[in-house]
């Protein structure tokens, strides 16, 4: 049963990764990227939380891991901005504040 779950996790994770590449790495539709990024991040972290809960680790570990996903999700959404000029994602290195300039073309965000 655990091997089946691992296979399902890998298939879902590959699907999420392929979706990320198609939606956020390719193309230059910045408005679409900005609109989809929060939902995509919440969905992918919800999938991770679901698998953590389904794997039934010790209760304290499960609570700690799922609780850690909440601020991590918020900080990931907050620290990722999309450049109007080149359409690429820019992230601040320490998650504490959003980036002010594009890390690719160096224009102001």
Image (cartoon, rainbow, N blue to C red):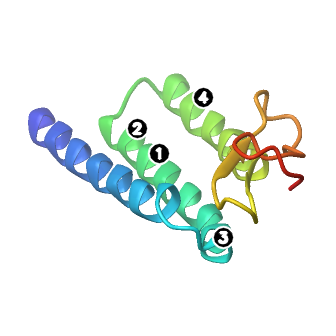
Q: Can you say whether 27 is above or below 51 in the image?
A: below
Q: Earlier in the sequence, mark 3 or mark 4?
A: 3
Q: Position of residue 23 (x, y in %)?
A: 47, 65
Q: Residue at x 55, y 31 (%)?
A: 65
Judge depth for marks 3 and 4 and give the one in front: 3
Looking at the image, residue 75 sits to the left or right of residue 12; the answer is right
Displayed quadrant of residue 19? bottom left
Query: Quarter holding the C terminus?
Result: bottom right
Q: Earlier in the sequence, mark 2 or mark 3?
A: 3
Looking at the image, residue 32 sits to the left or right of residue 98; the answer is left
Q: Can you say whether 42 is above or below 17 in the image?
A: below
> Within 10 Å of the Cα at label 1, are there few (<14), some (14-19), or many (20+) other Cα atoms?
many
Nearest the viewer among 83 and 93 is 83
Q: Which residue is mark 4?
A: 64
Nearest the viewer among 8 and 100 is 100
Q: Earlier in the sequence, mark 1 or mark 4?
A: 1
Q: Residue at x 78, y 46 (%)?
A: 102
**Which numbered dot is residue 30?**
3
Displayed quadrant of residue 32? bottom right
Judge depth for marks 1 and 3 and give the one in front: 3
Nearest the viewer among 88 and 85 is 85
Q: Residue at x 67, y 45 (%)?
A: 70
Displayed quadrant of residue 94? top right
Q: Are marks 2 and 1 in contact (CB under 8 Å)?
A: yes
Q: Which residue is mark 2?
A: 52
Nearest the viewer among 72 and 89 is 89
Q: Can you say whether 10 is above or below 27 in the image?
A: above
């Amino acid at each position: 049963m655990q091997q089946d779950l691992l296979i399902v996790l890998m298939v879902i994770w590959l699907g999420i990764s392929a979706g990320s590449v198609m939606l956020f790495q390719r193309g230059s539709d910045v408005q679409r990227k900005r609109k989809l990024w929060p939902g995509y991040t919440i969905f992918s972290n919800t999938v991770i939380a679901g698998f953590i809960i389904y794997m039934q680790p010790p209760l304290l570990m499960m609570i700690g891991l799922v609780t850690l996903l909440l601020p991590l999700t918020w900080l990931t959404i907050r620290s990722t901005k999309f450049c109007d000029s080149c359409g690429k994602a820019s992230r601040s290195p320490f998650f504490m504040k959003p980036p002010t300039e594009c890390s690719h073309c160096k224009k102001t965000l």
